Each structure stands twice: as C-alpha cells, then as structure tokens.
Image: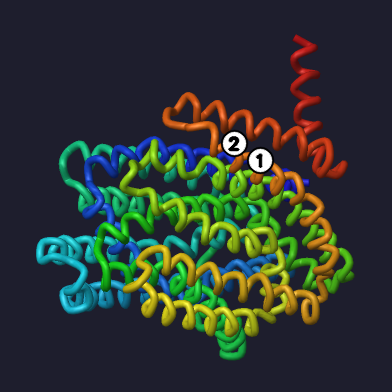
Amino acid sequence: MRSNNQLRTGVVLSYLNLAISSIIPFVYTPVMLGILGQAEYGLYSLAHSVVGYLSLLNFGFGTTIVRYLSKYRAEGNVEALSKTVGFFLMLYSGLGLVILAGGGILSVCIDSIFAKGLSLGEITTMRILVLIMTLNLAISFPSSVFTSVVSSYERYSFQVGINILSTIAAPVANVIALFLGYGAVGMTVAATIIQLIVLPINMCYCFRCLKVKAVFSQLPRTLVREMLGFSAFVFIGSLVDMLFWATDKVILGMLVSTVAVAIYNVGGTFNNILMSVSGPVSGVFVPRITGMVATDTERNEWTSLFVKVGRIQFLIIALIVSGFSVFGRSFIGLWAGAEYADAFWVAVLTMFPLCIPLIQNTGVSFVTAQNKHQFRSVVYLIIAIVNVISTYLIVPYMGIIGAALCSCVAYLLGHGVIMNIYYYKVTGLDIPLFWRNILRMAVIPAGMLVVGLMLNRVIVIDNWLTFFAGVVLFTTVYAVLMYCFAMNDYEKDIIRKPLQKILRIVKRK
C-alpha cells in the first residue's frame, strides 16, 4: 500500500515539477536572453554541450545502480545492497576526479577546437565556463549515487520534492547573478552552489531516513563483470543521446557561430520539455517493470502496461506537439524575438520524430530489465554516428535547419522503424495493437492541427492576449474531444475521480 501511495504521489509531484520547470524558464528566459544577448547565450549553451561529453564517464551505471538495488531490496539481501552502495560511492568519487582532469584538458584545447567559430574573447570566456561546469559535474557524480538509492526505494515524494526545490532555486539564482552583472559565468557558479547544497541533503536522507549503509568492500568479480556488462550498453545509449543532442551544437559552434548555437538551443528547449513530459509516468514504473520481468509475468501483461502508459503519454504529448505546430511560430516571436524565428523549424523537425520513443519509453524499460538492451544501443550508436557525419557535411550548406533535418531522419529510422520491429520480434510486445490504439487517438490532434494551420493564414497573433486566448481555446477543444471520443474508461477515471473527490469536499462545506 505504501508503495502504491508513493507511486501515485510520485507521479503527481513529478507533473507538478514538470509544470514548474516548464513555466519558470518561459518567464526568466527572455530576461536571460535580453541580458546575455545571442552570442553569450550561445556560448553558455555550447559550454554545456562540450562539458556534457564528460558526463559519459558515468558509463551508464545510474540505471545499473537502480536495477541492482531494487533487485537486492526485493530479495531482502541487505549485505549485497550495502556493498553495492559502497562500491559505487568509491567508483563515482574516483570518476569525479577523472572528470576534473578531463575538464582541465578540455579547457586547454578550446582555442584549437573552436578557432573558426569563436572570437578570442569568446574562447577565453568559454574556457572559464568549462572549468566551472566541470567542477559542477564532478560533484554531481557521488550525489547521483544517493539519488539512485532513493529511486530504488521508491521514495518518489522526497526525490521529486528535492527536484522541485532545485527547479525553483536554479532560475532564481540565475536571475540574481544576471542582474548583478556576472553573466554566463555567474549563472554557472550559481548552479554549482546548488549542487553543493543538494549533495548533503541526499546523503542525510539515505543514511538517516532510509537507514542505508555503505560497506566499502570488494564485490565478487562475477557480479562486477555482470554489472559492467549491463552498464556497457546503457553507456552506449548515453553516448547516442550525446551525439544527437549535444554534437549538433558543437558542430554549429565549430563551423558557424555562437549565434547559430543560440538559435538551435532555443529550438531544443521545446524538445527538452517534451522529453520531460513522458518521464514522470514511465520513470516510476521502472522498479515495477523490473519485478514483472524477474517474476516472468505473461507477455500480454507487458503489452497491457506498455499500451496503457503509451496512451496516457500520447494524450499529453499530442497536445503539446499539435499546439506548438499551430502556435509555436507566434510564441517564439513574442517570447524570444524575431531573430530566433528559425528555432521554430528546429523544434518542429525534431519534436515529431521524438514523439515515437517518448510514447514507447516503457518498452525501453522492459528491454533493459531483460538485459537485452545491447541491440538497441548498437543500432542507435550506428545511426547517431551517421547523424553526426551527415550533420558535419550538411551544416556548411543548410546551417541549423540542416542539423535538425539530419536528426529528424535518424530518429525516424532508429526509433520509428528498427526499434518497433525489435520490440515486436524479440521483446514480445504487441506493436500492431499499440499503434492501432495510438492511430485511433491521433485522428483528433491531426484534425485540429490542420484546422489550426488554416486559421493561422487569416488570424494574426501578434500579442500575448491573442496568443493565450488561442492556446486556451485549442486546449479546451482538444480536452473535450479527446475525453468524449478517444479516452477509455481508465483514462477518464484519472480525471473523474479527483474531480468527484473535490465535489464531495465542496458539498460537505
């Protein structure tokens, strides 16, 4: 019962955090863009992408920690759990030191890597940003072990609560740094301070509340080899994500300019929001999916959960994508300025293919729980490498649109075609049933998208009042049509039951 309550609370709080993390940037980002300017904002984004490669040094162990700690908790093996925590604390602390060294090397190489795209002043600032961001990343490594412990114990309320506090604290600290005149460097320092505050909070919760112990002794070699084998292909998945989402900006910084990086990053902001939408629902099911696989549950139950979660995710994602397609161009003009107009096409070209893995991410959890993620990782790595090569060749001719187009084609091929065949043939998920459900639901958002684009030809949205009126009307019509014609009883109950409880409370008063 406690686990179910934590699950429900975790989902609710996760979406609260999602709402906060989606709203706050839209309030402070125009302020940040106005103070930093396109060039410095692009430089800040570029530094994040460069340092992001160092995060690959976690070698995919984050998922491994949750998997094995969840397994040992289910088995009641306290000794193995404590040894695993101690092992990864030592490992991640050592990797943190490696990251510091790697950041130092990167900072020295900045001028030779970006000599064509950056000015001398930008290279100097970039070097400072890389060093500070490297320190932040190094601190986050041991901190992530405690985050994984909390996840494996399914204490979602605490975990998401910390995330909410961080979500609020980060932009507040950034705005203070900006108004004090410290620019991108000040924002980076503020993020590092927040990281230093979060680490001891997570430590205290794990040791004092969860009563977790860290035993620093050597794990059996067979177990270490098993963990490394599991993590190796998770690492490849992380590398793939980096090649898709960070390398585009690095190539633009190398071959074009920081302004191009800034525009591309603004377009990518909407993809980040889209990815964060599906995370809260699927993320809390990871321990449960691991248990279903471990107990050899029937495959039709796997498909049932796969379809159930996918439908819920599609309800939200389809609203965002169709709504952005209709109102996105106007929003970017009002929010970021006319100079960021091309960010709309970057967002659209990458959002549509991204919908496929986002509504199917529980499938990834099943594959990972089966320890069969090797094929997925290798396929994605090949496609990601092809994407990087094609982007490098096309960017000099098509700029940021070319980079986004390469990512679009690669995602459709990898997630849309190859992985769906794999889920069906190897994992045993009923993919035809899944897509029949999704395509029936897609009729309404597709129709609203077409109508919305036609209305855009006659209705000019040039102020916030008109924009918000259009968004509210679009959302209302979408919600009513989906509720009446697309949602099943389970999905309707998600809305009906809370409303019924509220109405009962109101009637009592």
User: Looking at the picture, how far across and down is residue 126, in whole percent?
Assistant: 20, 63
Other residues around mark 1 within 10 Å, as few (<14) / some (14–19) / many (≥20)? few
Q: Nearer the viewer, residue 429 or 463?
A: 463
User: Looking at the picture, how far across and down is residue 101, in whole percent?
Assistant: 25, 77
Identify the residue at image location x=87%, y=41%.
Answer: 489
- Residue hosting label 1: 451
Q: CA distance from mark 2 to mark 1?
A: 6 Å
Quick check: can you spot residue 93? no
Say which mark, if any, is on residue 153.
none
Vertical side of 334 occupied by 424: above or below: below
Q: Nearer the viewer, residue 405 or 137?
A: 405
Vertical side of 508 occupied by 10: above or below: below
- Residue hosting label 2: 455
User: Dots 2 and 1: beta carbons under 8 Å?
Assistant: yes
Residue lying furthest left in this view?
120
Q: Nearer the viewer, residue 466 or 317?
A: 466
Disc 1 marks a residue whose amino acid type is Val
Q: Quadrant of residue 112?
A: bottom left
Query: Viewed as shown, does residue 495 lie left or right of 270?
Result: right
Identify the residue at image location x=61%, y=70%.
Answer: 412
Quick check: can you spot residue 285? yes
